[in-house]
Each structure stands twice: as structure tokens, then as C-alpha cells.
Amino acid sequence: MRHFIALTPLFLAMNGCSDVHDHDHDHDHNHGVPTTLDLTFTGDNLAEPLTFRWTDPENDGSPVIDTITLPDGGDAAEHMAQEYTLTVRIYADLEGESEELTGEIDDDASFHQMLFWGDAVSGPATGDNPDALISHAYSDEDAEGLPLGLTNTVQTLALGEGSLDVMLRHLPPENDVAVKTADLAETVANEGLEAIGGDVDIQVSFPIVIE
């Protein structure tokens, strides 16, 4: 199911990674403006992967966004947890051309981290959430052993509907001080996004249904 959503800052903030940021080590951040984000779920209970997309190819604040729908394996009366591998792919789709940015983000992993939160989520960036429908855990890391988030583990916790918010954060050092830290996601859970440094590359809120 696809929904057309008029953007507000709650749904998307893009700083356009084609901008060059003045940070330590002369670190230039030159990949294109993200306009498409794909979330792909694979699991033993699925005959084939499920991919859900947010896309705004005109970059005009009028995106098309899929509702994430995941089978739980139970019925209306009983929850049965399912585990999924969640992979993230990001593209710049402008002027009729598509450029995948995922590889560049992976290559620059020490200065990036995906964050996952929302009223449907329990995980590092949300902390305990008794109303969560899914749990999130990182399954990949950068060269320093810090989370990246292009590959993740998701487990269903309950049946219902909610939101899954996804952000790619650009996190180069500032004034010789590391911005990307081991507890970055936990800082978001405890103090909010305003408590961390860096820039927002892309931020999207997906509707999610566990059934």
C-alpha cells in the first residue's frame, strides 16, 4: 500500500550531501542528495524479500511512501515473534537518473550512522518501549567497531500499527572531538536528537503494520 504524504519536518529533513561541510580533517561530504530510501526485510518465514520505499525524485517535498507490512506468524489472538534482517539502500534519483549512494556511505562509515526510532520501536535509539511492535538491533559496524545500520536485525513483538522513523546522520569530528560515539543511539533515546552533533542526510517516517 502506498500513501502520498505532504512533508513536514517530522517526516523528512535533508541537508543535501552534495554540500561540503567545514569539519576537521578537511573531510568533504560530496555524495548526491538522497531522494529514495529502500528498507528490505528478509526472513525464514518469507518466500521472497519484502522491500518498502520512500521516494521523492523531484525533491519537492511530495514523496510517495510505502506502509511497511510484516507478518508476525500468529493470529489475531496470539503473537508469534518473527526475526528479520533489515537492509537499507539509499539513492539519488534526480533528473531521470539514479545513483546509488549506499556504497559511498558504507565506505565513509566512520562518519555515518543510521538511527531507528518511533512509537513502534524498541531499540538503542528508543530505549524500553512497552508499546513497541518491533525491536531493532544493529548488525554491522564501521572500522572502529561502532554501529552503522545499513544491516540490522528486527524482531516482531506484537500485532498492531505504528511508526518507524529512519535517519541517516553525517557525523564527522568537530574541533578534533569525535561526534560519532559508541553511545550515540542511546544519547538519542535519553536526551533526544538535539543532544547529538552532525547533520541530517535523510529522515523519513514509515507507517508500519505487524499482522
Image: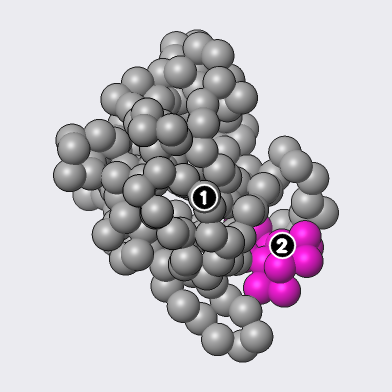
Give the quadrant of residue 4. bottom right
Q: Is residue 63 magenta?
A: yes
Residue 74 on image: x %, y % = 39, 33
The reply to whether residue 1 is in sight is no
Q: Residue 22 has which mark?
A: 1
Q: Secondary structure at mark 1?
A: loop
Q: Which residue is mark 2?
A: 63
Asked if residue 178 lies left or right of residue 208, the reply is left
Asked if residue 190 lies left or right of residue 78, the reply is right
**How many angstroms separate mark 2 from mark 1 (CA)?**
30 Å
Residue depicted at 30% across the width and 50% down the height: 109
Between residue 128 and residue 113, name the one nearer to us. Answer: 113
Residue depicted at 36% across the width and 58% down the height: 105
- In the image, residue 1 sits, relative to residue 151, either above or below, namely below
The reply to whether residue 28 is in sight is yes
Residue extent of the magenta highlight: 55-69
Residue depicted at 52% across the width and 50% down the height: 22
Residue 19 on image: x %, y % = 58, 61
Type of amino acid at the residue the image marks with label 2: Pro
Q: Secondary structure at mark 2?
A: loop
Asked if residue 201 lies left or right of residue 25, the reply is right
